[in-house]
Image (cartoon, grey):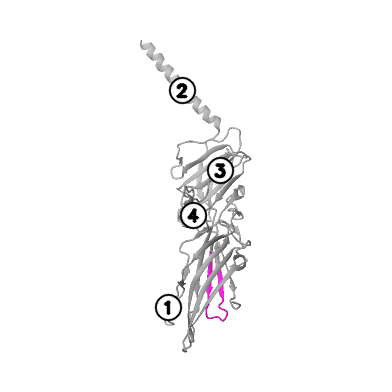
C-alpha cells in the first residue's frame, strides 16, 4: 500500500515536471519576452513628462508582426510604474524572426463617447500600414497634451523604448494694447471678436519610422479632411485697458486661459485669423469722443515666414499688439515658437486702408 502511494507521488511529481517543462518550452518557442521602457522625449517639459523624472503613467500598447496585421498585443494597458499589463499577460516576439511594430498611446487619449473622442485606436491594414485618426474639433483642452510613439524592434533589441512625443501643436493667443494715451488723448481698445478660421479640425496620420526620437516627427503633417473649422478664441467684448484714466498705468491683456491643441497642418491652405476690435478715443481738449470699429481677416501664413505650419510638438504663442494712437491703428503680431528652443519674430498689419 505504501509503495502504491509512493509510486503515485513520484508519478505526480514527474507529471508536474513535464508540464512545467512543456510550458517553458512553449514559451521559449514564442521567442524572447517583450519588455518596455517608457520615457518622454527630451524636448518635452511638462512636469509629469520631465526627462529627469521617470514616466510612471499608463500607456495602451498595440504590436504587430512587421508588414502584417498579425496582432501580438491588441491594446493592452501597460503600467510603467510596476511594469505589468492590465491583463496580467506576458508577450513574446514571433518565432519566425520578424520585427515587431509597436504603437503606444497614453491612456487618457482614448475617449469612449462622441464628446470626448480624441484619438481613435490604431488601424492596421493587411500590408502592415498603421494609421491613427483624430476627430475632435480645434481648441481641445489642456489634458490633450497626450503623446504616442511607433517603434520597429527586433527581438535582439532588448527592451522596447516607448518614447512619448506629442502629436499636436500647442496654440496660445494673447492680445494687448500699448500707448494707452498721450498728452491730447486717452484711448480704450475693446476686443470684440477673435477667431481662427478655415482650420483643419480632423484628420488621419500614417504612423511610420520617421517618427523616431531623432527627429521628433516634427516634419509629419496630418492628412487633414476638414478645412472649414472655426475656433472662437473670444466672442464677448473684452476691454484691453482696465481704465482710461491717464493716471492709471495698468494695462490688462486678453490671453487664452488654456493652451489649445490643434492638428499639425500647413498654413498655406487658407487658414485665417479674424479680429474685430473697437477703439474709443477721448480727446482731452473737449472734442467729442470718437469710436471706431475695425475688423480684419489675416492669412496665418502671412503673419510670419517662421510659422508656415503648425508642427507636432510645437508650442506656439501669437501675440497681437494694438496701438490705437498710431494714425493707421496698426496691429503688430509677435510670436514665440518653442519646441517644448525658441524662435521669435514680428510682423505688422496696417489698418490705414480700412
Q: Which residue is drawn at 49% across and 61% down?
A: 259
SS at mark 4 in the image: helix
Front residue of 318 and 223: 223
Q: Which of marks 1 and 3 is in front?
A: 1
- Residue at the spot of label 1: 243
Give yes or no for contact between labels 1 and 3 (Cβ–Cβ under 8 Å).
Answer: no
- Which residues lie in the magenta part? 317-334
SS at mark 3 in the image: strand
Q: Residue at x 53, y 30 (%)?
A: 28
Q: Is residue 174 above or below residue 215?
A: below
SS at mark 2 in the image: helix
Q: Nearer the viewer, mark 2 or mark 3?
A: 3
Coordinates of residue 296 in the picture (x, y in percent): 57, 71
Give yes or no for contact between labels 4 and 1 (Cβ–Cβ under 8 Å).
Answer: no
Alpha-carbon span between mark 2 and mark 1: 85 Å
Alpha-carbon span between mark 3 and mark 4: 21 Å
Reading the chain from its start, which is encountered first: label 2 or label 3?
2
Q: Which of marks 3 and 4 is in front?
A: 4
Alpha-carbon span between mark 4 and mark 1: 37 Å
Reading the chain from its start, which is encountered first: label 2 or label 4?
2
SS at mark 1 in the image: loop
- Kindly identify which numbered label has been placed on residue 144: 4
Q: Residue at x 45, y 56 (%)?
A: 47
Q: In this view, does 215 lie above or below 268?
A: above
- Kindly identify which numbered label has been placed on residue 17: 2
Is 330 contained in the magenta span?
yes
Front residue of 32 and 219: 219
Amino acid at each position: 500500500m505504501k509503495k502504491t502511494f509512493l509510486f503515485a507521488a513520484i508519478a505526480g511529481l514527474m507529471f508536474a515536471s513535464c508540464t512545467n517543462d512543456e510550458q517553458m518550452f512553449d514559451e521559449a518557442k514564442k521567442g524572447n519576452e517583450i519588455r518596455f521602457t517608457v520615457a518622454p522625449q527630451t524636448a518635452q517639459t511638462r512636469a509629469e513628462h520631465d526627462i529627469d523624472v521617470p514616466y510612471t503613467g499608463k500607456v495602451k500598447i498595440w504590436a504587430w508582426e512587421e508588414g502584417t496585421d498579425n496582432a501580438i498585443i491588441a491594446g493592452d494597458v501597460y503600467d510603467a510604474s510596476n511594469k505589468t499589463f492590465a491583463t496580467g499577460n506576458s508577450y513574446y516576439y514571433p518565432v519566425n524572426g520578424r520585427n515587431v511594430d509597436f504603437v503606444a498611446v497614453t491612456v487618457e487619449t482614448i475617449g469612449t463617447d462622441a464628446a470626448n473622442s480624441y484619438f481613435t485606436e490604431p488601424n492596421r491594414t493587411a500590408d502592415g500600414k498603421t494609421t491613427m485618426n483624430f476627430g475632435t474639433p480645434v481648441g481641445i483642452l489642456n489634458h490633450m497634451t497626450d503623446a504616442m510613439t511607433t517603434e520597429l524592434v527586433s527581438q535582439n533589441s532588448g527592451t522596447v523604448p516607448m518614447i512619448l512625443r506629442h502629436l499636436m501643436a500647442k496654440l496660445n493667443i494673447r492680445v494687448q494694447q500699448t500707448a494707452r494715451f498721450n498728452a491730447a488723448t486717452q484711448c480704450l481698445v475693446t476686443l470684440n471678436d477673435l477667431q481662427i478660421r478655415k482650420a483643419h479640425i480632423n484628420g488621419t496620420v500614417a504612423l511610420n519610422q520617421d517618427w523616431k526620437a531623432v527627429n521628433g516627427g516634427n516634419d509629419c503633417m496630418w492628412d487633414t479632411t476638414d478645412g472649414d473649422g472655426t475656433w472662437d478664441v473670444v466672442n464677448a467684448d473684452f476691454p484691453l485697458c482696465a481704465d482710461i484714466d491717464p493716471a492709471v498705468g495698468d494695462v490688462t491683456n486678453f490671453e487664452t486661459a488654456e493652451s489649445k491643441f490643434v492638428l499639425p497642418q500647413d498654413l498655406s491652405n487658407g487658414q485665417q485669423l479674424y479680429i474685430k476690435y473697437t477703439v474709443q478715443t477721448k480727446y482731452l481738449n473737449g472734442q467729442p469722443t470718437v469710436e471706431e470699429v475695425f475688423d480684419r481677416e489675416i492669412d496665418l501664413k502671412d503673419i510670419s515666414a517662421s510659422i508656415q505650419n503648425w508642427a507636432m510638438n510645437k508650442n506656439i504663442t501669437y501675440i497681437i499688439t494694438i496701438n490705437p494712437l498710431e494714425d493707421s491703428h496698426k496691429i503688430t503680431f509677435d510670436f514665440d515658437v518653442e519646441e517644448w528652443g525658441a524662435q521669435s519674430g514680428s510682423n505688422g498689419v496696417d489698418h490705414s486702408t480700412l
